[in-house]
Image (tube, rainbow, N blue to C red):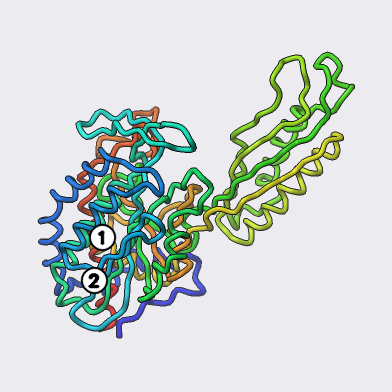
Amino acid sequence: MRSIPSVRGLSPAIALAAVLWSGGAMADQQGPLDARIDAAVNAVEAKVIAWRRDIHQNPELGYQEVRTAKLVADHLTALGYEVKTGVGRTGLVALLRGGKPGPVVALRADMDALPVKEEVDVPFASKVLATWRGQQVPVMHACGHDAHVAILMGVAEVLASMRADLPGTIKLLFQPAEEGSGDGSPGGATSMVRDGAMQDPKPEAVFGLHVSSGLRVGEIALRPAGLMASSDSLRIEIKGSQTHGAMPWGGVDPIVVSAQVVLALQTIASRQIDVTRSPVVVTVGSIHGGNRGNIIPDTVVMEGTIRAHDEDVRNRLHEKIKAVTEGTAHAAGAEAKVTINRGYPVTVNDPPLTAWAGASLRRAAGAERVQESRPVMASEDFSVLAREAPGVFFFLGITPADKRPGALGMGGAAPNHSPRFFIDEAGLKLGVRALSFLTVDYLGRAK
């Protein structure tokens, strides 16, 4: 049996580097199915691009992905997959049972778009409007989920073409609402897990990718342990006492107190959390209070986001935010109510599986094209799936060669979620190849 190497006891960075750069056996071997994978990937590339453009032109918001799910379901059914729709409301699960016994591996793609007005000049630009939080808004695939769906549709076709020789079962997860629902419903991964997507059969591993403007076409980045941050929402209500703006001593000014709270919160990351253990971010992005310049209001409401890369640090951060906010308000004679709603957990790449996957990705992309990612403060609900089975999530470059990755304003690429987010479709082929190699290598490791 060819097992996943153990790297426990090594730091995540050393563990990944040891496998990626050691020239290990699997990285240098060419498996018997490699040529077939390459031929199948080449054959499906044009379809992947066409699917991506169709989905991009017809984006759907979270839990509204009816058209996208039907496109996927029709394709997978035609390939011979067992397809179950309506999983997690608008998601679907598809099974391909190989011709030989073996493990179960899951692959995931998210399907939803964002309430963003497209500013990219392409023939298939989105003109779609949809309802988001009770309002009509423009909709765009500004985070690349259209590419994720098209890539996994391509992978499905590649794997179906060699079904008889595959030892094990492939489970495909096409997930809704990674970007949220807008109505307070849980994210799509949570909804799918609640509907049994990670059971019957239970996968032994789950893989996923995300296109990134921070990498050029042909590049892949991953890291063991914490790859992407947790994401929690923060709401603070500062209760003061209303008075005339000309006589502030007659009341308690919640606007001044809110300013003091914002500044005090920043000292948590800089002075109270060991940032060598986990990077953290506390951002206040919204402050609302008052309606006239000469009236000090009773109340100010602030909203923000909290990010961390370690679950213990995440919990401590919550405690510190509450203590600092309440203490600052109390010192000024005000009251503070702090509400923290836990969102997506830290996206944790299983270290032994990541070390193994790094070698497989080297074969798919070339050793010089696979690099270690820095910790990313954005969040992903792939993290929910990776709590159900060991997971590996990696970034796929889609920035053209003549652009600086992630350097908007300096002649570089617009970031994910930007109305100018652009995908160089030459990068899609490597996404199909990478997931196909990971799947075939993982299933074949038990030979």
Mark 2 residue type: Leu
Label annotation for residue 434: 1
Q: Position of residue 163 (x, y in %)?
A: 16, 73
Q: Measured along the vertical axis of the image, is residue 418 above or below residue 17?
A: above
| Circle on res. 96 | 2
CB atoms of marks 1 and 2 within 8 Å = no
Please provide percent x and percent y for residue 39: 10, 61
Q: Hey, which residue is sitting farthest right in the picture? A: 250
Q: Report the residue at 22% width, 67% height from top.
A: 81
Secondary structure beneath label 2: strand
Measured as percent of width and height from the top left, residue 84 is found at 30, 65
Q: Pick whichever of labels 1 and 2 is earlier in the sequence.
A: 2
Q: Judge left or right: residue 108 versus residue 161.
A: right
- Badge 1: few (under 14), some or many (20 or more) residues near its Cα, within 10 Å? many
Q: Which residue is drawn at 66% across and 58% down?
A: 315
Can you say whether 392 is above or below 407 in the image? below
Q: Which residue is drawn at 29% across and 62% down?
A: 361
